[in-house]
Amino acid sequence: MIELERKPFRERLAHQYSTYLSELEAGYMMGREGCGPVAKIMQYKDLHTDDFKDVLVFGSNSYLGFSNHSYIKQKVKQAVDAYGIGTGGSPAFSGYTRQHHELEQRLAKLAGHEDAILLPGGYMANLCWVNGLMNRKDVIVYDKNSHASVINAIKMTGVTFYSFDPENLAQFNKLLAHIKNRTKGEAQIFSTVEGVRSIDGTIIDLAGYIDVCKSQDVITILDDAHGIGTVGKTGKGTLEYLDLMGQVDMRMSTCSKAIGAQGAFVSGSRELIFLLRNFSYPYLFTSALAQPTVAAISAALDLLETEPQWVQRLQENVSYMQDRLENAGFEIIRGVSGIIPVFFRKDGVVRHINKALYQKGLFANIMEYPMVPPGLERLRLSMMATHTREEIDTAVSLIAETAKEFDVL
Ligand SMILES: Cc1ncc(COP(=O)(O)O)c(C=O)c1O
């Protein structure tokens, strides 16, 4: 990888494109083309023909099925009529409206914080807080499995950074003490972890992590992209699930996953959000979230408040799928959210299995090196509240049948 980075641009391009072509042959399926609303059954383009066919979707982040929910669509249509389709400006200039303000207040309340700001996506939200809070004198200590947006934001902002393993909090504590010593207490340390972890759907010892951070005066930011709408009694996310509401300094959640729309928010104290609102370039210099999307997020929050059965159904489906996979003999990680990793423990096999599943009508995703360490490649199933028991049974049968064909079950 490093050798490739050093090559001149044209050589790098030729190498990367030819690698891509050979990977396509081997079953690389990024960019599969869908058609129609995002739902548990969707039309996707066949890999070998131009025909679209129905596939059973176990690979969408729309965990609650809200991307195609009739109530939300109705609210969006009304918003289009009332406000049009775009904001025509950044929040700092002309793009900020009463609807943005009201939604931000609602999101702050949901997060248990004083204030919140809306951004056009989770990637931008992570750029926003890194860029808005820190300067080159500060230090960030991030979970080694953090999302690409966090790592990219850190590199772009040029802050000093360290990664850590949240499974080892004693080591984390030592690292913080070492940083304080090295910087003679002059640097502010920030730290970030995920709530429900995107990599495997589990949650770290968040209470222990927060205790360590508090004891070392570290400012904490929780990325709860996969927690909102999937865990907690009323879908408020990981902090509600663990009874830790209000215990982190800031929180980021996307509205592109369980909320079913697009956009994201960052919440925190009035002072911290003031800093982002007035000084963070990724907030100041991009157009405010479009009004129909603001309406979609608000409508999704209505549903979370009035129809708790969505989160409950998702949870029931997750447990049912985990039981069925384990009974069929699969090695899985039993997390608490909509993400279920399935391991086959044979080098390179997961992409072939995934391709075969797709051809049989099952859409799932995979994680391979460098997203996960070698040996930990996995099929990554994403559950939806709208899946029926029958559909889950069909998915398990297809995975079992295919795993047997590849001699890994
Ligand atoms: C943990 C985490 N943070 C941030 C993001 C980015 O969110 P968005 O898709 O809204 O840009 C993702 C998306 O995959 C994610 O998994």
Image (cartoon, rainbow, N blue to C red):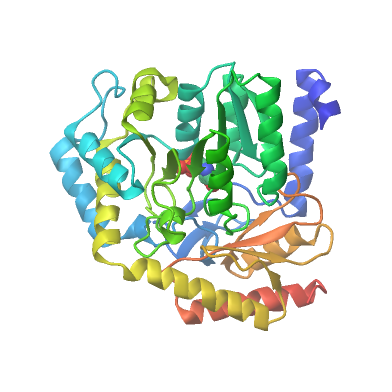
Closer-to-camera residue (138/313): 138
Residue 386 visible (yes or no)? no
**Is 307 placed above or below 262 here?**
below
**Is 354 placed above or below 239 here?**
below
Question: Which of the image's four quarters has the C terminus?
Answer: bottom right
Whole-percent x, y for residue 56 in the image: 52, 68
**Is 298 placed above or below 131 here?**
below
Whole-percent x, y for residue 273 in the image: 35, 29
Instruction: Give the image quarter of residue 103.
Output: top left
Is 242 left, or right, of 50 in this rendering? left
Residue pictured at 52% horizontal, 51% vertical: 195
Whole-percent x, y for residue 109 in the image: 28, 46
Closer-to-camera residue (322/286): 322
Residue pictured at 66% horizontal, 83% vertical: 327
Question: Which of the image's four quarters has the N terminus?
Answer: top right
Q: Residue furthest left?
A: 82
**Is 374 placed above or below 214 here?**
below
Whole-percent x, y for residue 97 in the image: 20, 30
Is 123 left, or right, of 379 in this rendering? left
Closer-to-camera residue (376/146): 146
Residue 303 visible (yes or no)? yes
Total numbered circles: 0
Residue pictured at 83% horizontal, 21% vertical: 7
Instruction: Give the image quarter of residue 38.
Output: bottom left
Is 323 left, or right, of 120 in this rendering? right
